[in-house]
Image: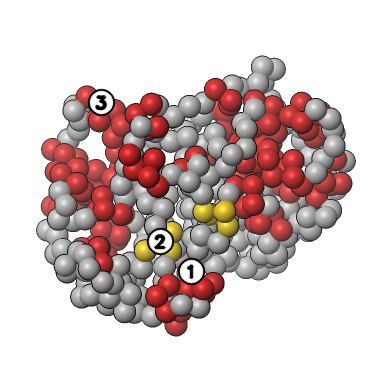
Amino acid sequence: MVLGMAACVKDAPNEPVLPTDEPNPAPNLPASLFAYSQLQFPQAWLDDPALQLFGGLGSDVEVTDAGATLGRVLFYDASLSVDGTVSCSSCHQQEFAFADPAAKSVGVSGQPTLRNAMGLFNFRYQRRMFWDLNTVGLEAQVLQPVAHPDEMAMPLDALPEKLQALEYYPPLFEAAFGDAAVTNERVQSALAQFLMSFQSYSSRFDAGLDNDFEGFTTQEIQGKDLFFNGVTRCNQCHSGKNLFSTQAFINGMEIDYAAAGDAGIGALSGAASDDGRFKTVSLRNVGLTAPYMHDGRFATLRDVVDFYSDGIQPHPYLDERLSVNGFGVPGQEPYQLSLTEEEREALVAFMHTFTDTVMVQAEWLSDPF
């Protein structure tokens, strides 16, 4: 939550940590701002038919260098939580593609969140947010975890005054917006600008698209062929250069998701046809974002491959792409791939080539404190 929240480890996980009187350190920012406003996706991405078809252009906010710089500070600042112990980055860590290595996050309340924290990147192509797609646009989404009682628990009506009192914020707000006034709307805009700068298109897979996969191992090539061969149907749900879909699927992890504790979109709509319908996430950086699925139930990529090979459960509205026929009405008999050991390992090896080589190390996306 800013987008999902995930592991915030504390000495006493069941007890909120009390605030301290220690002053916040000022962020260490470069004298010359990074050119966030100049970040652009490659033209091949902008021309990608799948992105043109599915892309919701997640936010129409204008990214400025000063605005995204302010957003960077806000993203990493634990002052946005009620007790000064949790930041957005506590549960969205750069080294894990801004995901969390824990299945469920723990915020200021000490209680685990309901769902796993997703990786954060490529928001230009995401319009609806959260696992149940309940929010449209980044600006509408970024303050929800700040206010959530189990995450950062910060009363939003008190947030501007709290930030205004920190000496490093008035100059940052003035640079970004023309005056030093701190408002929740400006916090939303700055955070959205920073998040729009999480662009992931630099991986071995991307290089392979340009050089005919020179340097790929035999195993990785086998995995690539399996992924795109139409039989496994991997790229029917994870398509285009972003390896994603804006559709939400029922993928057969449960026979009855509501009874198992989380009905996804069905919990909002009340429709049986939405029981267990969740967002389809991008596979970019999937080698870094374990554990997997909305509840973090699968610890490894191999677990995920095993599930889709022969673990899909019958469900009255199972997506047709996961059924024996692969088309038609939902709710058909689950598809059983029965992959060999060699094929399973090859798919895992290939998916590791989706790992970005720039974003997870970029200084302009790193912690400034």
Could you say which quadrant of the image residue 341 lies in? bottom left
Asked if residue 245 lies left or right of residue 194, the reply is: left
Image position, residue 156 (x, y; %): 78, 55
Q: Are marks 1 and 2 in contact (CB under 8 Å)?
A: yes
The circle drawn on residue 248 is: 2
What amino acid is at disc 2? Answer: Ala
- Tag 3 secondary structure: helix
Residue under label 1, please give it. Answer: 265
Image position, residue 225 (x, y; %): 15, 44
Dot 3 or dot 2: first in sequence order is 3
Dot 1 or dot 2: first in sequence order is 2
What amino acid is at disc 1? Answer: Ile
Query: How many angstroms separate mark 3 from mark 2 (CA)?
Result: 31 Å
Image position, residue 162 (x, y; %): 84, 47
Query: How many angstroms separate mark 3 from mark 1 (CA)?
Result: 38 Å
Residue under label 3, please give it. Answer: 210
The circle drawn on residue 218 is: none
